[in-house]
Amino acid sequence: MQSAQFELHAQIEQRHWWFVARRQILRAIVGQILPPSAVTTVIDVGCGTGANLAALADEYHCVGIDTSAEAVALARQRFPRTQFIVGRAPDDLGPLMQKARLVMMMDVLEHVPDDFALFSAVAAAVRPGAFLLVTVPADQRLWTAHDETFGHYRRYEPPRLAQIWEDLPLKPLLLTHFNRRLYPLVRAVRTVNRLRGRDKVAGLAGTDFRIPPKPLNRWLQRFFAGEADVLCRALRGEGPGYRKGVSLLALLQRTAGPAEVRGKPVGIAPDYFDPAASRTPALSA
């Protein structure tokens, strides 16, 4: 992400339906696994401009970390009672990693060239019993210029996401799509635009984000946030979750034993896009 996208997040993520509903889903899931407590540490890796973490700060001890000094400055300005750090996880968090009961990576892994290395390093640094909560964009068929603007290397399918914790001392508690209710509409719009040669963004700062009229914004927020009940039931083993969706969510728990920090394995499918080169490798080989 670049300056324009961080500024846009800071401007709209308190009001835009997608951000607001996702935070409601986040709070519901976290509430299922961690009783509220001011001494329970929650870490947000790749916290960006801070709204996801701030949504939990009234009930937990929250710490955010991001490599972008600009993003952290915006987070500190907007949420001065929450701790934010400029740096890389897990190294720049020091002993905080061993205190964490929950580490979140909310739409982070798609931004890094080696998602295996980042995830395994975080998993190796947390104590047994800690939870890891991950969200990523799903379904490569939904790829648009929005993904390229945000510096995404890939979108995920469940098997590709599950590969990052394979053979690590982690117990998967939930792996499901979400933003399912709007998936048919999102896919249809993006498919039609692509067929018409208009694979462009329709929102602000090179993204798909634009706040719709208030009644529609409220309806979309409630419609999306309503998925929280299904996801929480799936976490309790009372349902299957969602088989399709715009995003994926995984919740895992660290078990005993050493975790090897490793990079991408040989034979893994190449990334769809290279943000550093601003090109699609498959089309430029």
Image: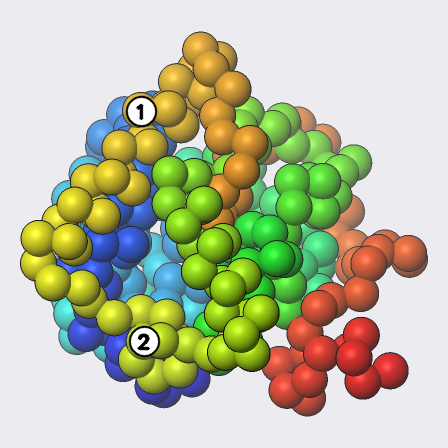
Check disc 2: other Cα within 10 Å, few if <14, some if 14-19, many if 20+: few
Horizontal side, residue 191 vs residue 120: left or right: left
Q: Outermost residue, right direction? A: 266
Look at mark 2 in the image and give the residue it sits on. 203
How many numbered marks appear?
2
The secondary element bearing badge 1 is classed as helix
* Pointer 1 residue: 229
Q: CA distance from mark 1 to mark 2?
A: 30 Å
At horizontal 11% and vertical 63% (from top left) the residue drawn is 213
Q: Amino acid at mark 1?
A: Asp
Q: Position of residue 245 (x, y in %)?
A: 49, 42
Compare residues 51 and 196 and report the one nearer the observer. Answer: 196
Front residue (pair 195, 7): 195
| Residue at the farthest left position | 214
Q: What residue lies at 79% left-to-right and 79% top-to-bottom?
A: 283
User: Tag on residue 95?
Assistant: none
Name the colour scheme. Answer: rainbow
- Residue 68 in view in this figure: no
